[in-house]
Amino acid sequence: MSRHEEHMKMREHFSKAALAKGTFTSGTDKALVQAVTKMTHEEVASRINQLINEYQFPLTVLQDVQKRLSDSYCPHYAMQQLRYLENNVHAGIATKREDSNK
């Protein structure tokens, strides 16, 4: 198990404990645990593909996400990449494709 995977398992454990107790160190931990518990890895992959099909992202963003996803199969890490893409959309960095409405 890689060091990153160990870190994510420990973070998942502490976040789930915080969710059960209702205490969090940050909103990110709460959002991450709630989102991961609601979405399967396949659903996350599907949503990532949907965003990439609907929006034009800068090449550097797509290369970064592709590299990070190829480094780890951890569902929590994939969820972080999905949030990164969604943040790019909300920030206006990614633009809606013309043909996505068809």
Image (cartoon, helix red, strand yellow):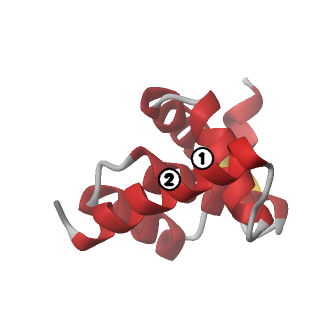
- Quarter of the figure that contains the C terminus: top right
Of 46 and 96, nearer the camera is 46
- Tally the numbered discs: 2
Q: Position of residue 10 (x, y in %)?
A: 42, 61
The answer to whether marks 2 and 1 mark residues whose Cβ atoms lie closer than 8 Å is yes
Disc 2 to disc 1, C-alpha distance: 6 Å
x 69%, y 41%: residue: 34
82 w.r.t. 36: above or below: below
Q: Position of residue 100 (x, y in %)?
A: 70, 34
List the residue tagged with mark 2. 12
Q: Which mark is residue 93?
A: none
**Image-quadrant location for residue 54:** top right
From the viewer's perspective, tell me whether residue 4 is left or right of residue 83.
Answer: left
Circle 1 SS class: helix
- Quarter of the figure that contains the N terminus: bottom left
Circle 2 SS class: helix
x 75%, y 62%: residue: 24
Of 62 and 97, nearer the camera is 62
Q: Looking at the picture, which amino acid does disc 2 mark? A: Glu
List the residue tagged with mark 1. 16
Q: Position of residue 49 (x, y in %)?
A: 51, 38
Q: Residue furthest left?
A: 1
From the viewer's perspective, tell me whether residue 50 is left or right of residue 96.
Answer: left
From the viewer's perspective, tell me whether residue 31 is left or right of residue 12.
Answer: right
x 38%, y 68%: residue: 7
**Image-quadrant location for residue 80:** bottom right
Res. 17 visible in picture = yes
From the viewer's perspective, tell me whether residue 93 is left or right of residue 78.
Answer: right
Q: Looking at the picture, which amino acid does disc 1 mark? A: Lys
x 44%, y 34%: residue: 41
